[in-house]
Each structure stands twice: as C-alpha cells, then as structure tokens.
Amino acid sequence: MAEQPKYLQVADTLRQEIAEGIFRDGQTLMTEEELRMRFDVSRQTIRQAISLLEADGLVDRRRGSGTYVRHGPRRRQGIIHVGVITTFITDYIFPSIAQGMESVLNQNGAVMSLSAMYNDVKTERNILERMLEEPVDGLIIEGSRTAKETPNRDVLDRFAQRNIPVLFVNGYYPGMEHIPHVVMDDYRGGRMAARAAIEKGYTRLAGLFKTDDLQGTERLNGFLDEIHAHNLEVPEKRLLCFSTEERNNLADSPKGKALLEVLSGGEADCLVSYNDIFAAQFMAKLQEMGVKIPGQLGIIGFDNATFSAMLQPALTTLGHPKDELGALAARKILRMIAGEREESTRMDWVLIERDSLPERKK
C-alpha cells in the first residue's frame, strides 16, 4: 500500500493532538512557518492539512490573526450522511429501530447508510474504517459484545479526531460511557421482570441471559438483585448464561438441555428469558416435553417482538419502544452534527401481561 500523502499525515497528527488536548479550544495553532519546520514539508502541504482540519470543524482561520482551535460543526456540503451500524438488520426488533431512524433522517433531508456487523468485532472494524474513508457526517452504532472493552476503540477515537459525532444505541463499551447513548434501562428491566413473577406468586425463578453484551449483563444483574431483595435465591442449575457463539439452537445445546431438565422436572416455576426469541424457543421445547405452560411453568421475555402475542400461550414480555428509540437516536445525532451537545438517555420498559404468566394458585 502506498504511503499516505504528507498533508494527510500532518492533518492526522494535528487531529490527534487536538483530541488529546495538546491544543485546546480557543488556542492559536502553530503558525504555518512553525508547522512547516516541525514537519519538514512545504508551505502548500501545511495549507492542505489545515484546510482538512477546517473542513472537519476543528480549526478556524482568521485572516491576519492566525488559526485557532475550535470544536464546531463540520463544514459540510450537500446532503448529510449518517452511518448506522447494528448487530443485525433484517430480523427481530432491528427493522423497527432502523425504520424509526430512517423516518427522522428522511424528514430532515439526511441519508442513512445502514450496515450489520453480526456481533463480530472484525466486521465492525472494517465497517468503521470504511465510514471514515467516505466519510460520514455522524455515526450511530450498536456495539459488538459490549460486556467488555472493544479492540476497536482506536478506530472510534479517530471519529472524535475528525470531529465526527458518535452515538451509541442499545449498549456502549466500558470506558466509553462519556459518549452519548440511547439505551433501555436494562438493569431496571431485569428487576421488573423478576418482580412481576414474584408478585404473581412465583418463588423458584430460573434465568436465561446472554452475557457478552451490556444488555444481557444488566438484565441479569437486575434480575438477581430483585430476587435477593425478596430473600429468594437462584441456584446455579437454574441459571443459564450464554454467549453470541452459543445462541443458535441454544435449547439443543448441553447447557440448554440441562436447563430444560430443571424446568421440566419441577425445580423451577418461572423462566425469565433474555428476549422473546429464546423464550419462544424454550417454550416450544418444554411443550414438546409435556410441560403445561401456563400451569406448571410461567414464562416472561423481553422486547415484545411481533410474534410474542401470537404464541400459544401468548407471551408476557417487557415492551421495547423500538421505533421511538430509533427516532430519538436519529434526532440526537442530527443535533450533534449541528454542533449541539447531547446527554445520554435511558428508556423505560413497559410490562405487557399475557397468558404465559398468570397468577399462581396457592
């Protein structure tokens, strides 16, 4: 690969120094002559580099005064382009979230570039680098495996260096909580699910949670805290924690079969599931095994997926404001592109009671 042109190297170095606070807002950048001597390049190269920083909204050139550092909106021409990266696109709740984003962006004359990284950090990195090259004016991203720090932080930092605003949805990476995000209050959701079951008379709860993303770990923590608050316990055999790699055919896996044995053997009276997909999967398996739902076992899921009301029995679930979440994320990123500051938002779950979690007879 050919070496990066000198003016791009100079611009990248200055972007990083501005991001690190070496040059602060309102401070004069070095003069063209000082920069020329520092980087050992021509005056024209320095001017090209400064033009890039100016287009990124990182500096302001004032005739006869100098070049000043500032963090303002990028100087765009034409249509606003917003990059959107989600774990998946075509299934479950993701089309509704994307539709909410697209509706707001279209109303404001912006174009959405939507990509899926299938919860894979390498794919995420490739998409991020491509969006830096295009570049986009703003980025909405649902992180991959957000229960731990991302190896792609260096690429995400380059968006900040380019003054391209970033907004997280559904989750965010440890150590990057300062970046605005729109998420569900998953910890509270975990507590709500457990409380809904306990208040209906269920005392031997089982849990099924995906724990390599922030959503799953927060739901699990809330679930456990609510149970402990009622002086109840969840033995290890009643708790199944799984990763992205284990999600396919989970009920047929050794872990899944072990939990099914516990559930069908009467050792638990209610299953709280990470989402409606796995609730439906385990419900079907249990019914094949002759377990009466409801009756012997209650089930509650998360997300209020379209199919959840069509199951037999209809699934009790926590409702996810899918379109609203997407629309809010789009409004926030547009304001950030315009140079406004945005705060993070945690959205509330709504309990949707159906037949799978009736009052338990004493």
Image (tube, rainbow, N blue to C red):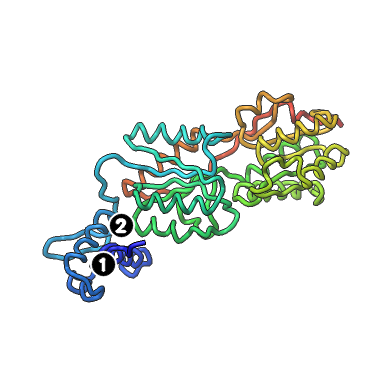
Q: Is residue 212 left or right of residue 117?
A: right
Residue at horizontal 76 percent and vertical 44 percent from the top: 253
Residue drawn at (34%, 55%) of the image: 163
- Mark 1 or mark 2, which has the lower sequence index? 1
> How far across and down, in percent of the image, does residue 107 sit?
35, 31
- Residue 83: mark in rendering: none
Q: Looking at the image, which residue sits at the far front?
A: 1
Left or right position of 107 against 65:
right
Residue at which label 2 appears: 71
Q: Relative to residue 269, is residue 249 drawn left or right?
A: left
Give the quarter of the figure containing the C terminus.
top right
- Residue 116: percent from the left, percent from the top? 50, 43
Residue 245 image position (x, y, % from top left)? 65, 48
Q: Which residue corresponds to mark 1?
A: 27
The answer to whether residue 25 shows anywhere in this view is no
For residue 243, side relative to residue 265 (left or right): left
> Dot 1: within a 10 Å radius of its alpha carbon, few (fewer than 14), some, or many (20 or more) residues?
few
Q: Quadrant of the N terminus?
A: bottom left
> 10 Å neighbourhood of mark 2: few (<14), some, or many (≥20)?
some
Q: What kind of element bears circle 1?
A: loop
The residue under label 1 is which amino acid type? Gln
Observer-nearest residue: 5 or 321? 5
Residue in the image at 72% along x and 44% along y: 208
Amino acid type at mark 2: His
Residue visible at 47% across and 36% down in the picture: 98
Q: Is residue 111 above or below residue 180?
A: above
Q: Secondary structure at mark 2?
A: loop
Tally of numbered tags: 2
* Image spot of residue 255 (x, y percent): 77, 47
Q: CA distance from mark 1 to mark 2?
A: 11 Å
Res 159 → quadrant: bottom left
